[in-house]
Image (spheres, coloured by chain):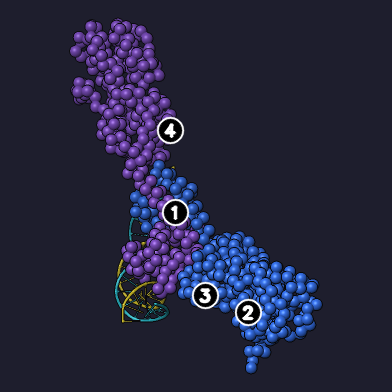
Chain colours: A purple, B blue, C yellow, D cyan
Amino acid sequence: MVPPHLSARHLVAFVELAEARSFTRAAKRCHLSQPAFSALIRGLEESLGARLFDRDTRTVALTTEGALFLDSARRLLADLQHAVEDLQDHVARRRGRVCIAVLPALAAGWLPDVLAEFRQQHPGVAVDVQDVLSEHCVAHVRSGRADFAVAATRSSASDLLTERFCADPYHLVCRIDHPLARVRRPTLSHLAGHPFIHLARHSSVRPPLEQALFPAQLQEVMALEQLATVAGMVRAGLGVTVVPELTLFAFQHPELQRRALDAPGLVREIFVVRRSDRSLSSAAQGLLELMEARRPRPSPTSRRRAERAGLP
Amino acid sequence: MVPPHLSARHLVAFVELAEARSFTRAAKRCHLSQPAFSALIRGLEESLGARLFDRDTRTVALTTEGALFLDSARRLLADLQHAVEDLQDHVARRRGRVCIAVLPALAAGWLPDVLAEFRQQHPGVAVDVQDVLSEHCVAHVRSGRADFAVAATRSSASDLLTERFCADPYHLVCRIDHPLARVRRPTLSHLAGHPFIHLARHSSVRPPLEQALFPAQLQEVMALEQLATVAGMVRAGLGVTVVPELTLFAFQHPELQRRALDAPGLVREIFVVRRSDRSLSSAAQGLLELMEARRPRPSPTSRRRAERAGLP
DNA sequence: CACACTTACGATATTCGTAAGGATT
DNA sequence: AATCCTTACGAATATCGTAAGTGTG
């Protein structure tokens, strides 16, 4: 149906010849010898089944049908160029869209600087962020609404690829005038008997805590959805709490004391989750690489304690 | 700028592979061996500078950028196909437009049957007819408003090509009860002394008459623009007239007598006029060929007299 | 005879199909 | 083991540039 042999070169040569009205000049503009150019045009005419030019030995002029095709050829070339440039813009990350799903704590505390850097590098790439709880992050990836997720859920499903991203060690938070505020190196056993403020059960903060705190007799005062609310309750003296380091941005308050917990087993792990059946777009790949380069590092104290625990 | 090597085949192969999601199946649909097809896709990816497919040994899937380009490729192929078909439709005379300029007499008497036949052969080709006087016919061709003209003017200008089309011998027309109606073989000298009705001076009927009638003492009654008016005047007995054979359709009336004039030098010649710097469109070429095949032939009487005059 | 397009022809590149290789289910 | 894509390689095909041919002003 469509002449398979027809190439962009044919169209370019045709337009050049129509404009130059001379095989010699058009051949030069196409960086071809004149006979090669002549053969090119002949090949085009044959594959189209139409004479496009009247060539006298002295003049070259479009036929009526050639003039008709000239418009088409110009339009086709412009469309082709547009399509190719659009594709290359996406590959080069000059344009595009990345959709990611990120835990609210990371989205608020760590992500903004990373995204600022990414947007500076690739101002044409739009970024959609779904700042939702871990399970929802994974659901977004699975349904295709997100290119990848940074979440605390490790999915064992075969349609998803899970890769460890970073560790998020826990910290104690209490009022600065609370008795625990003066403990230099608090452990889980220090928490016994103190009123404790939890995050909601479906938060990814809970599972590691649940496992580690089982032995300690906690006096649970309440469970809340939002970190800011927990911070407010602790500041009001209603209790203490234990939260992962990456949420500490919500507890930056002069009346609050934050200390790394000396509890080697108590770590929330953060994963990157993506679909196993499709590769990342160039822009998504770029964002993921930047995220990995800017991967959050645990505080020096937490790191030292983790190392010490790992040695023996 | 645009990858010159990119051909329609690449786009077809790309779309086929995107749909088949299998190199083997897509290769078959393109009538290629699977390795050749593989190389084709690789070449496309290289010339675009973008990976279009993720190929596992087990699955083939579009990359994000490939999915983007799929829309473009489909659109480009459809546009290309449309452009090529449009061109071929014009070449095959399934579509198009022919603009011709034809002397009013021929346009009314001879042309209709020719055009009816042409329209039956090529119902998709529109025909514009300018039925105007000879000089206007030529002007239309020169300005490009007509593809060619059938007129009585021979142009010597180098931008026009003039080719003899047919001869148009003159006939005497008078009332059936007029004395000349009984003359079997009227000549110019028979006209002397009879009131004569002329066509207007700018009509192409006049110049040959002017030359031939100089010796005869004509009693000119009036000069008119339209053949039908001349016919009316003759029928009313105001005079006789002499007109070319191709205008006789206007004198078909039971009260009018028509006789071929025995005046060998008195002939209006009809020409086909076209531009020398551009070729005819396929449709125009077709119409011209049909016209030449249906070229008007002088009546047997006129022909016999012309032959007899040509022998000695 | 000078200019411009076409044809001829040998050299170089591309593209093809067959056959072998490698990876995954 | 079967399937599917890639690599290897010799053969067929296309394309290129130089040089000669042809027709026109």
Amino acid type for the residue under numbered disc 3: Ser
**Subunit that carries the residue with mark 2:** B
Do the dots labelled 1 and 2 sit on one chain?
no
Question: How far is disc 3 from disc 4 in space, using C-alphas?
Answer: 74 Å
Q: Which residue is mark 1?
A: A75
Please tell me which of labels 3 and 2 falls first in the chain: 3
Amino acid type for the residue under numbered disc 4: Arg
Q: Which quadrant holds residue A176?
A: top left
Q: Which residue is mark 4?
A: A145
Q: Which residue is mark 2?
A: B209
**Subunit that carries the residue with mark 3:** B
As drawn, is D24 to the left or to the right of B125? left
Q: Residues within 10 Å of mark 3 (few under 14, many from 20)?
A: some
Amino acid type for the residue under numbered disc 1: Arg
Please tell me which of labels 1 and 4 falls first in the chain: 1
Question: How far is disc 3 from disc 1 in space, using C-alphas?
Answer: 40 Å
* Residue D20 x/y as whole percent: 34, 81
Q: Secondary structure at mark 2?
A: helix
* Residue B95 x/y as whole percent: 57, 60
As drawn, is B16 to the left or to the right of B310? left
Q: Which residue is mark 3?
A: B155
Question: How far is disc 3 from disc 2 in space, using C-alphas?
Answer: 20 Å
Do the dots labelled 3 and 1 sit on one chain?
no
Q: Nearer the viewer, mark 3 or mark 1?
A: 3
Residue at horizontal 76 percent and vertical 71 percent from the top: B236
Q: Residues within 10 Å of mark 1 (few under 14, many from 20)?
A: some
Question: How far is disc 4 from disc 2 in space, using C-alphas?
Answer: 89 Å
Q: Is residue A188 above or below residue B201?
A: above
Q: Quadrant of the C terminus of chain A?
A: top left
Residue at horizontal 73 percent and vertical 75 percent from the top: B239
